[in-house]
Image (cartoon, grey):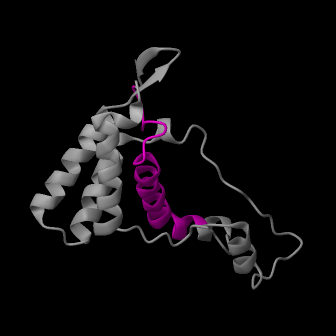
Amino acid sequence: MNWRSAPAYKLTQLFTQKIKQLAPLPNIYNIDKTRDLIYKLKDTHILPHFALASLDIANLYTNIPIAETQDILSNTLKQNSLDPHTQRELLSWYNTITKQNYFMNNGYILIQEDGLAMGAPSSGLIAEFLLQYIEHTHLTRMSTKHKIINYF
């Protein structure tokens, strides 16, 4: 069985293309390459008592809350002034994609019950919607509370 030929996989590809086209993420804090981080840090005055931190999420895809992320996506589609029909269609695709979390392991087809499917083209984009929402809604408060001078 070639999972890349599965209908749900093809739908994830189409979903990802449409979302990137119709509701692109701002990617304000994203770093593409180490060189980009160095460039952004070059104008930051780092004192000896400062600390640099790197954040990571354990088991990212399986820990993405599907319903909460759907609400975030829905709000983003509305903010991008998409017509209601297109919004409903994309959210319907989202529901199909997030419910079709199956994979093959040692010849057995298994269903992943939590989070996003590993290897699906849409999983990175959907996770990014949640992560950017968290950054946008909590970063100002966290920066003040923890005296964060830069966040990338």
Q: Is residue 150 left or right of residue 97?
A: right
Residue 64 on image: x %, y %: 44, 42
Q: Is residue 101 left or right of residue 135?
A: left
Residue at screen point 46% across, 66% down:
136
Quarter of the picture holding the N terminus: top left
Q: Is residue 99 left or right of residue 150?
A: left
Q: Main secondary structure of the magenta part?
A: helix
Q: Nearer the viewer, residue 10 or 101?
A: 10
- First to last magenta residue range: 113-142
Residue 85 on image: x %, y %: 10, 59
Task: Find the residue positioned furthest to the bottom.
Answer: 43
Tell whether position 75 is magenta: no
Quarter of the picture holding the C terminus: bottom right
Quarter of the figure with residue 75: bottom left
Using the image, determine if residue 7 lies above or below residue 131.
above
Using the image, determine if residue 12 lies above or below residue 40.
above
Q: Nearer the viewer, residue 111 or 106?
A: 106
Residue at screen point 60% across, 69% down:
143
Residue 54 on image: x %, y %: 71, 56
